[in-house]
Image: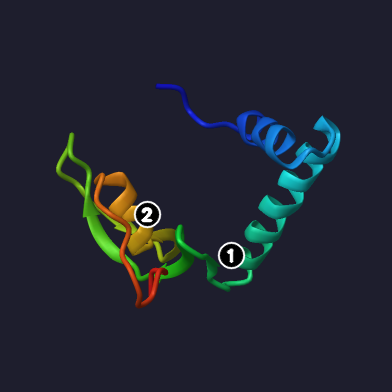
Amino acid sequence: MDTVTRAHLAEAIYAQVGLSRNESAALLETVLERMATALEAGEPVKISAFGTFSVRQKGQRIGRNPKTGVEVPILPRRVLAFRPSQVLKARINGQPLPRGGRDDAR
């Protein structure tokens, strides 16, 4: 199984939408840049029937070096989280798509 890359996505846009290869690549870059900018600003990015990307703040905690056992502080940081929608979960598990109700992750 191959990893899906920007090139694969741009090629899919080219094949399905009918834009030129350059326009398809530019469209993809614009979408990804808009998503990154929103996440950088702390805004969630919700894609209907796919899922929600969000940034969470994690506090400082004490970790342990597994080799030496020495305790080390893990600094506060922001982490990217993804919550898949019910529709995506059903597709992955080969189940029928949910009917009615919400199709997005909350």
Residue 36, how many percent across, how many down?
A: 64, 57
Type of amino acid at the residue the image marks with label 1: Leu
Q: Residue at x 70, y 32 (%)?
A: 15
In this figure, which residue is indicated by the disc labeled 1?
Answer: 39
At 64% from the left and 67% from the top, the residue drawn is 38
Query: Please, which residue is most extreme toward the top here?
Result: 1
Q: In the orientation shown, which residue stands out farthest toward the left?
A: 69
Q: Are marks 2 and 1 in contact (CB under 8 Å)?
A: no
Q: Give the image location of residue 40, x and y in percent.
A: 62, 64
Q: Which residue is mark 2?
A: 88
**In the foreground, 63 or 5:** 5
Q: Which of the 4 image quarters holds residue 100? A: bottom left
Cα separation, mark 2 vs mark 1, equals 21 Å
Secondary structure, mark 2, is: helix
**Image height check: is 100 above or below 6?**
below
Circle nearer the N terminus (2, 1): 1
Q: Is residue 7 left or right of residue 105?
A: right
Q: Quadrant of the rendered structure where residue 84 is?
A: bottom left
